Image (cartoon, rainbow, N blue to C red):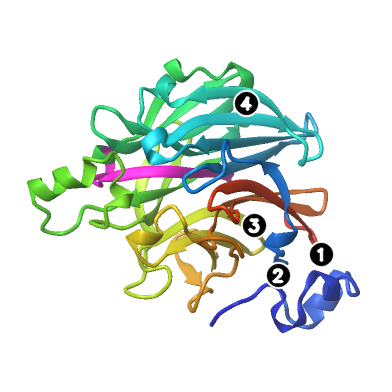
Amino acid sequence: MRLQPGASGFTPEALSQKTRRQTMIGRKIFSYLPLFNPEEGITIVEPLNPGRGWWAGAPSVIYDESEKAFYLYYRLRKPRELGRGAICVIARSEDGIKFEEIWRAKKEDFNSPSIEKSALFISPEGKRRLYISYVDSETNKWRVDMLEGDSFESLDPSKRRKIFTPEDIGVEGVKDPFVIMIGGVYFMILSYAPTPPGVTEELKKKMHETADVYNTGITKSHTGLAVSVDGVNFTWLGDIFSPREEGWDSYASRISTLIHMPPAFIAFYDGSASVEENYEEKTGLAVTFDLRNFIRLTVDGPILTSPHASGSLRYLDAVAVDGKLYCYYEYARPDGSHELRLNIVELRWDTN
């Protein structure tokens, strides 16, 4: 099965003629999530320079109802020889389109070769949190820490707290957190790199000599789950979404976001077929009812891609505000660079 945006006549244009929820229910269509045309997106952040290896993306977005404001995290990357994931930013917006930078950190603030995707979160107590992934300079392995403050502007990298290192969960790398809360419990979805069976010490050393195990081809990019009651001390529950034996997503299957469409969660994930496509993943779709068992919907190919360069469209995150779904994603440009882009999808019924 290969889903396409607008398949079976369910384009946004078609749906606009039948906006009543009863119409869809009468057709036994439940928890339907309209998609979008990536080419019609709005550029939110451009890369620092043109060309391959220059990226703006890896977004995390939340909406603070008390302030009527969007908060958006993203990272700016340079080519590997010029510094990799160099800068991370938090920006604020009242319309979800025009953002003003309120916080910035560099990889040097984490004593790291590279920083990557993070997760913004506001706790029930009002604490502002940033769960951030970066390479530990002592081990050359990806890890996840947390910054916490009374405001996002006050986050201090020097006061970060450890959430997970690879050694904590017996893997070779852990990164790209996505965090939600259900029933007072924090659920964190993570990309992780398992240790290959029978790996030798020599091979293990080779996995980390470039400070990016995911780009070696020795292991793969899986998705795992952890839970916590306080958002600080997490328990690792293990794998929830693995690369297939073969197919377009047989090297990476990395869940980037969940969208609640009761009684299900719709998952967007980044997929690639080989290490040659690392950094240039495309977006697939899955569904789950329990966050442990996922039904992969995009078996034959990705559902969202860019028409340019590598075709990469990855790291999608989304937030529902006032009947609209704001979808932010990293998108390949004609020159091979990546930009941070937005599409706004009109929801046809309540997603809460």
Mark closest to the chain's N terminus, 3 or 2: 2
| Residue 246 in sight | yes
> Would you name the residue on which mark 1 appears?
348
Rendered position, 258 above or below 188: below
Mark 1 vs mark 4, CA separation in Å: 32 Å
Q: Is residue 206 left or right of residue 111?
A: left
The circle drawn on residue 32 is 2
Residue ranking furthest to the right: 17
Q: Amino acid at mark 1?
A: Arg
x and y percentages locating residue 88 in the rendered image: 53, 30
Task: Name the N-terminal-most of marks 3 and 1.
Answer: 3
Query: x, y (%) of residue 162?
Result: 37, 28
* Labels in figure, total: 4
**Res. 125 mark:** 4
Q: Nearer the viewer, mark 1 or mark 4?
A: 1
**Which segment is the magenta one?**
168-183
Q: CA distance from mark 4 to mark 2?
A: 33 Å
Asked if the residues shown at circle 3 and circle 2 are in contact, with their CB atoms under 8 angstroms apart, the answer is no
